[in-house]
Amino acid sequence: MADKKEIFADGIGQIHFAGNMVRFDFVTLQPEADGKAPTPVANIRIIMPPQGFLGAFNSMQQLIDKLVEAGILQKNAQ
């Protein structure tokens, strides 16, 4: 992985399912004039098959559980 590339995103603007693929539109926050709140601008899209999405979701859930256990995150009461 010597050619590994890093991509920064402030968050996910949209997740949708089209053409039998899950599509994540990542955004960065772009500053506005006069100190107004930044605007999210889509800058990259990740497309994966549903099975890949499920694997990614499971990996993220495991990381969330570890962060909660470490006290870094707190679960919201619903």
Image (cartoon, rainbow, N blue to C red):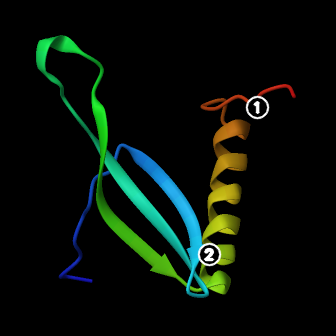
Q: Is residue 59 above or below residue 27?
A: below
The disc, 2 or 1, on the residue closer to the chain's N-terminal end is 2
Q: Amino acid at mark 2?
A: Phe
| 49 left or right, relative to 44 | right
Relative depth, front residue between 53 and 33: 33
Q: Which residue is identified by label 1?
A: 75
Disc 1 packing (10 Å; few <14; some 14–19; many ≥20): few
Q: Quadrant of residue 59?
A: bottom right
User: Do tag 2 and tag 1 residues touch (Cβ < 8 Å)?
Assistant: no
Q: Quadrant of residue 55?
A: bottom right
Residue at 30% from the left image edge and 20% from the top image edge:
37
Per the model, the C-alpha gap separating discs 2 and 1 is: 23 Å
Q: Position of residue 14 (x, y in %)?
A: 50, 55
| 9 left or right, relative to 48 | left
Residue furthest out toward the top: 34
| 64 left or right, relative to 14 | right
Q: Position of residue 41 (x, y in %)?
A: 28, 46
Q: Is residue 73 above or below residue 44?
A: above
Residue 53 is tagged as: 2
Tell me the quarter of the image containing the C terminus: top right
Residue at 28% from the left image edge and 53% from the top image edge:
8
Q: Secondary structure at mark 2?
A: helix
